[in-house]
Amino acid sequence: MSTPTRVTPQQAWDEFIAGNERFISGQVAHPNQNVERRTELAITQAPDVALFGCSDSRLAAEIIFDCGLGDLFIARNMGHVVAESITASMEYAVTALGSSLIVVLAHDSCGAVAAAIDQSSRTPSPVTDSVRNTLAPIQPAVQQLWHRHRHDTPYANADEIDANAVGRIHLAATVNELLRNSRVISDAVDRGELGIVGCQYRLAEGRAVPYTAVGPLSVELATLD
């Protein structure tokens, strides 16, 4: 049986993105980072937001969204590539912890995206099997963008492709993959209990820009192109 949500997806999003605005402006509040909060969470947790993001060291979610202990349930890996453990983590947040929002967090200048472009080139760099397998789900985004304008060769050229645009295509695909892999997540969205927002974080600016959203949400989206 699922744990009831405490706030609506819209309320969770509004509070979440407000933290990013504080971070951008330098007016951070550092909420829920004291001894009392630590004690309160010793035997329980109830995060309203679950976050699945790239493991890049510059995406410290509690910092860039001005959150504290117990506010975010986080899973991260290279290139935010959906795997069974990721799906299970997001399902756990929704069903056991009552999270009403999943945020998928990509970022510009992503090393995994750059590596996926390289692996899609005529002469890919040598990588380990585990890295190659992890990059494989990003490569369809490379091909999708490459073949919009180039039809003479299937091999991508890093100098002729917008890596950040590839990242945005992969971001939308990641959101779709979570929905495709999990009936639990899809059903929660369908019932109006869960929203999913895909954002690309701009490293220099510090802003998380939403590009895709699913569920009962009113979010001003930037265009994927």
Image: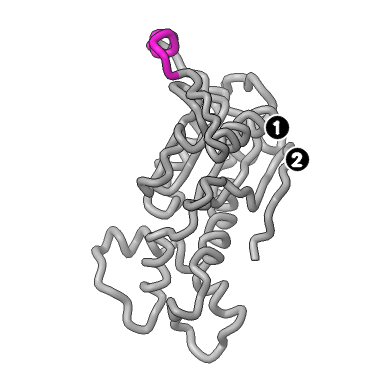
User: Viewer-proximal residue, 144 or 15?
Assistant: 15
- The residue where tag 1 is placed is 10
Which circle marks residue 218 in the picture?
2
Q: Position of residue 208 (x, y in %)?
A: 57, 46
Q: Quadrant of residue 39?
A: top left
Q: Is residue 223 above or below residue 180?
A: below
Which circle marks residue 152 in the picture?
none
Whether residues under marks 1 and 2 lie with C-beta atoms below 8 angstroms apart, the answer is yes
Per the rendered image, the range of residues in magenta is 33-42
For image coordinates 39% across by 60% down, the residue present is 112
Q: What residue type is disc 2 on?
A: Ser
User: Viewer-proximal residue, 195 or 83?
Assistant: 195
For image coordinates 46% across by 22% down, the residue present is 70
Per the model, the C-alpha gap separating discs 1 and 2 is 7 Å
Q: Position of residue 30 (x, y in %)?
A: 48, 24
Label 1's element?
Answer: helix
For image coordinates 57% across by 23% down, the residue present is 98
Q: Position of residue 152 (x, y in %)?
A: 53, 91
- Nearer-N-terminus badge (1/2): 1
Q: What residue type is disc 1 on?
A: Gln
